[in-house]
Image (tube, grey):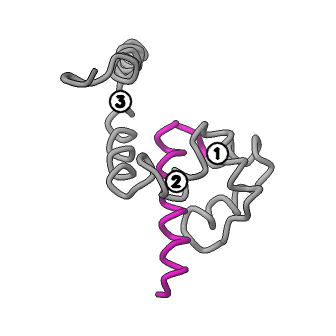
Amino acid sequence: MSTEAQEWKRLGARLKGVREYLGLSQQHVAQVTGISRSAISEIEHGRRKVDSLELRKFSKLYKYPVSALLGEQPGGDEESLDAISALARAVGDLTDQDMTELLRYAQFLKFNGRPGVE
């Protein structure tokens, strides 16, 4: 497999990981972005290239920077993708109350920093 084909596969995997993390279906993404569901599937499997306008649509819907989708900044690398995928699977069975608590904790971490970080 060529380096370029590997890049398209990685981009597709990042897009799929973020979509699943957000709990969005391919059908919903298709309706909001105007990209067909079959095209989204092809993109996520790395079998179809993404043009810049489509990438912007994904970025806007997912509220995720294009550079992160491209793997060019923290949050877009393979380790982060694995973590996001694991989180998406873990929260699938949580109650609404648990989800609310988890979101509050994530916001706490985001806005209050980590221990030892000023």
Element assignment for label 2: helix
- Which residue is denoted by mark 3 in the rendering? 93
Contact? badges 3 and 2 (CB < 8 Å):
no
Structural crowding at the residue carrying mark 1, measured as other residues with C-alpha within 10 Å and reported as few (<14), some (14–19) or many (≥20): some
Give how far apart the Cα atoms at labels 3 and 1 are. 27 Å
Q: Position of residue 61 (x, y in %)?
A: 67, 39
**SS state under label 1:** helix
Which residue is denoted by mark 2 in the rendering?
Answer: 16
Q: CA distance from mark 3 to mark 2?
A: 20 Å
- Sort mark 3 into few (<14), some (14-19) or many (20+) by Cα contacts within 10 Å: few
Q: Earlier in the sequence, mark 3 or mark 1?
A: 1
Majority secondary structure of the magenta segment? Answer: helix
**For the point 60% across and 43% down, which residue is it?**
25
Amino acid type, label 1:
Ser
The one nearer the camera, 89 or 2, is: 2
- Can you tell which of label 3 and label 2 is closer to the viewer? 2
The label on residue 11 is none
Instruction: Give the side of residue 113 with respect to residue 29, left or right.
Output: left
Q: What separation in Å lies between label 2 and label 1 (alpha carbons)? A: 12 Å
Label 1 sits on residue: 59
Q: Amino acid at mark 3?
A: Asp
- Seen in the picture, residue 88 relative to 47 is either above or below; the reply is above
Residue 32 location in percent, x, y? Answer: 75, 41
Give the quarter of the image for residue 63.
top right
Magenta stretch holds residue 11:
yes
Q: Residues within 10 Å of mark 2 (few under 14, many from 20)?
A: many
Q: Nearer the viewer, mark 3 or mark 1?
A: 1
Q: Which residues are magenta?
A: 1-25
In primary-sequence order, the first of circles 2 and 1 is 2
Camera-side residue of 3 and 21: 3
Q: Is residue 65 left or right of residue 83?
A: right
Mark 3 vs 2, N-terminal side: 2
